[in-house]
Image: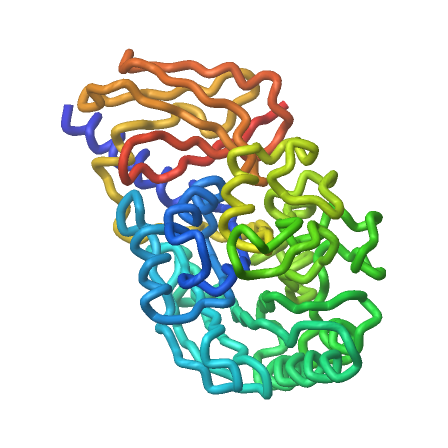
Amino acid sequence: MFKTILTVAFFIISLCANAQGTIKTMFYNLLEFPSAQPSNREQILMEIIDDYEPDIFMVCELESEYGADLILNTSLNDEGVNYLRAPFQPSQSGDPDHQQILFYRKGMFTLEAAEVIPTQVRDINHYTLKLSTADQQTDPVLIEVFVTHLKSSQGSGNQTLRLDMVNQFTDRLETLDPDSFVIFSGDFNFYTSSEPGYQELLDPTNAIVMVDPIDRPGSWHNNDSFQDIHSQSTRLSSGPFGAGAGGGLDDRFDFITISENMLGNPKLKYIESTYKSFGNNGNCYDNSINSPDCAGDFSQELREHLYNMSDHLPIVMDLETDKEIVLDNPDFAVISAILLENTMASSELNIRLASSVSESVSFEIYNTLGQKLLEFTSENTGHISIDISQFANGIYYLKTNIPGFKTLKFLKTP
């Protein structure tokens, strides 16, 4: 009996160590948070985050440390203490009310450093995250995360201010290890890829070469050829809320860019086709994101939340590592309540429930884009089989309604 218990324990610990090969990132312009209407936006944000569950969450237009704590305690840690945040650092630039900050999954990362890079307009916030891997002492995976909000509006003067801010970023790259993994995200307010700031950002002569993961150059503004990557505005009119911009989706203002080494280095690599304007079904040009005409993979419920939350859509992107990620201090009791018998499956996903689970359990399965593919409720029968034969091959995530339950990952194979 004791040997059997040890075997199960080692299985669970192994599952905790290997179940997180994917790192999910999200950037979001929160629109004057928390003062803008409606007044319950921390709850709305919770629903949006629960749809995607980022491991790295980067934001701009944060007004105060109070707002940062609202996000942490209500929007992120609604099911237990699963996230931490970087220190809130007051503005050192010209805009005291619009700040950036980083939230990250507890146990998956350690925050090694944080700094502010002042500019004429708004700060650039720089954070160094260390991934919790089995060999982090001898071969650490460090991610240099930069978050900002470039100068808004058209005109040569504003383009020059955007360029000056980007120059501050590219100058800072010269002080980093040239092999660093770098993420630079924000509301960049670029109208076209010909803008000097965008050209400087991707200049191949920079100390660390940055790339736009989707590589879609062009004139993004008011161009339906790019409607699938537009991120602003989620609303035809700002009237109902008194803040933000209207006009419908017709601009690509929000970006996550990465260092070129993340296109091919297995130590930390961008997963192709995971970069999305979250909630954009590709059919919402010059329309509100919650319009019934914009139906598709992203649900009506999610798009309603996005409409109410901000005039911007989040940008999401997944990374993967060939390292073994070890989550610190896993909640043994919660994880052991539900186990996947097979983390790789071609036709049936088999789930085992512990006898301690006395209530019915709701299950949801999501793909890597955060789209819900299946939802069902089951009584505790001890064993559940789910037909996944019609799923495309790839990675999926299993969620339940059990408080504190950590999402489990499985691979659909041929």
Residue 413 percent across, percent down from the top left: 59, 26
* Residue 6 visible, this orientation: yes
Residue furthest to the left in view is 2
Q: Is residue 381 left or right of residue 412?
A: left
Quadrant assignment for the N terminus: top left
Q: Is residue 62 left or right of residue 155?
A: left
Taking the spot 31% from the left edge, 37% from the top edge, the residue there is 405
Residue 215 percent across, percent down from the top left: 78, 57
Residues 371 and 242: in front is 242
Quadrant assignment for the C terminus: top right
Taking 153 as reference, is 134 above or below it? above
Taking the spot 68% from the left edge, 36% from the top edge, the residue there is 294
* Residue 315 visible, this orientation: no
Residue 125 percent across, percent down from the top left: 50, 76
Residue furthest to the front in view is 239
Taking the spot 65% from the left edge, 55% from the top edge, the residue there is 246
Residue 412 percent across, percent down from the top left: 56, 27
Residues 65 and 353: in front is 65
Residues 342 and 295: in front is 295
Taking 214 as reference, is 365 above or below it? above
Taking the spot 48% from the left edge, 34% from the top edge, the residue there is 397
Quarter of image, res 265: bottom right
